[in-house]
Image: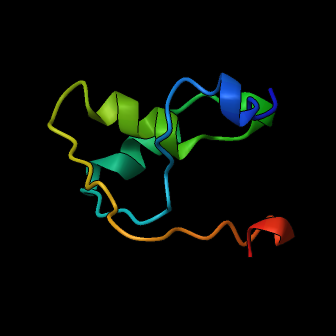
Amino acid sequence: MEKPKAEEAPSNLAIIGRYLLTPEIFEILEKQAPGEGGEIQLTDAIDTLNQTQLVFAKRFEGTRYDVGDSSAL
């Protein structure tokens, strides 16, 4: 599945790739079925972890640059 166009996205939130996870995540990852593209998805494992313990997020305040898109630089 490709990323939706910005105007079709379900929210304006994004994961910017910084995690502090408990050791339990590794056991979950070992058991995690492959997701999109046949790869193990960390976000799926975090969802599973959230079923047994609290998972917190921090909203980033500032400017985020998409370095994968030269038009955003």
- The answer to whether one can see residue 29 in this image is yes
Quadrant in which the N terminus appears: top right
Q: Quadrant of residue 68?
A: bottom right
- The answer to whether one can see residue 35 in this image is no
Q: Position of residue 57 (x, y in %)?
A: 26, 49
Q: Residue at x 28, y 48 (%)?
A: 24
Q: In the rendered view, how is the structure colored?
A: rainbow
Q: Quadrant of residue 49?
A: top left
Q: Quadrant of residue 51?
A: top left
Query: Against 13, is 21 above or below?
Result: below
Q: How many marks?
A: 0
Left or right: where 60 falls relative to 4:
left
Query: Against 19, is 34 above or below?
Result: above
Left or right: where 45 falls relative to 1:
left
Q: Residue at x 69, y 35 (%)?
A: 6
Which residue is at the far bottom? Answer: 73
Q: Position of residue 13 (x, y in %)?
A: 46, 42
Q: Residue 46 versus residue 16: which sits nearer the camera?
A: 16
Quadrant in which the C terminus appears: bottom right
Q: Residue 39 versus residue 72: which sits nearer the camera?
A: 72
